[in-house]
Amino acid sequence: PADDFPSLPSPNSEEQIILETKQFSKAIRQTAFATATDASKSVLTGVYMSAKGKQVKLAATDGYRLAERTITVKKITNDLEVIIPRRTLIELDRLLKQTKVDTFALSSSVNQIIFQLPGKQLSSRLIEGKYPDYTKILPKHFESNALVDTKLFLDAVARVAVSAPKKNHVVSLELTNNEMILMAGTELGQSKESLEIQYEGKELMIDFDALYLIDALKIFLKDAPALSFMLNGQVQPAVLKGLNDDTYVSMLMPVKP
């Protein structure tokens, strides 16, 4: 019986944030992949969302990688800071693609997030807890910068990764003289490939988990034909950004030598 079901939360129409469907769907794709799968890190299994001024930010991290997307909106009545379960956002993305509307409304009530589409409402419990201040580990200045073709970079990593160790999938990148040399191998075999880049900075050798690097490059492939790959040495996090695009940033922790 309908009366036996819990009542749906009521959205506050005065505090709604109106979001563009395509823009928010893109933001979900760009961030949700970086959430943690380890249930013991409960706050990291969701996507952090903050709304302040005229900006909505979505961010996700599992401790090894991080993705942040910034969206500009017309009006935010009250500041908002929540952690939305990844599963909720994946379901919302599916509904947005089915409904095919230009905009939808977002609001919240006590420990709930509410998405309103024409004839549909999706509500979900939020993840309780305090999200870590990821901005403290996101570098602002860099010693080296490589400009690289996104597809060529992705394809090269995927090919070389075939020879990477199964345990940690390490691929080594050597950056020097406008060239990136990608290497991976075990006692069973080795792979090596050279990629032409535009490079500014000191010669550098750095290792990454190939699977994480491939995940990040796949996200950029749809939106950014070329990337800025920014680094601060062997053990500091690396940052990926599309050229002339400050709305999206992806960060990767290197594998320590």
Image (spheres, rainbow, N blue to C red):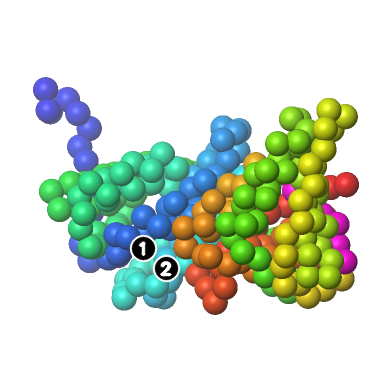
Question: For the residue labelled by badge 1, is the local secondary structure a helix, a strand or a loop?
Answer: helix
| Sequence-first tag of 2 and 1 | 1
Would you name the residue on which mark 2 appears? 71
Residue at 26% x, 45% y: name it.
95
Residue at 67% x, 70% y: name it.
147
Placement of the N terminus among the 4 image quadrants: top left
Of residues 67 and 128, the one drawn nearer to the viewer in this rendering: 67
Dividing the picture into quadrants, the one containing residue 25 is bottom left
Residue at 36% x, 68% y: name it.
78
Q: Is residue 192 visible?
A: yes
**Any magenta on residue 121?**
no
Q: Position of residue 29 (x, y in %)?
A: 44, 51
**Any magenta on residue 206?**
yes
**Mark number displayed over residue 202:** none
Q: Position of residue 131 (x, y in %)?
A: 56, 52
Is disc 2 in contact with disc 1, using a CB cutoff of under 8 Å?
yes
Q: Main secondary structure of the magenta part?
A: strand
Would you name the residue on which mark 1 appears? 23
Disc 2 vs disc 1: which is toward the camera? Answer: 1
Of residues 211 and 111, the one drawn nearer to the viewer in this rendering: 211
Residue at 27% x, 50% y: name it.
96
> Around disc 2, counting alpha carbons within 10 Å, would you say few (fewer than 14), some (14 to 19), or many (20 or more)?
some
Q: Position of residue 46 (x, y in %)?
A: 49, 45
Amino acid type, residue under disc 2 in the picture: Ile
Magenta range? 203-208
Spatial CA span between label 2 and label 1 = 8 Å
Q: Position of residue 227 (x, y in %)?
A: 61, 66
Q: Is residue 255 visible?
A: no
Amino acid type, residue under disc 1 in the picture: Gln
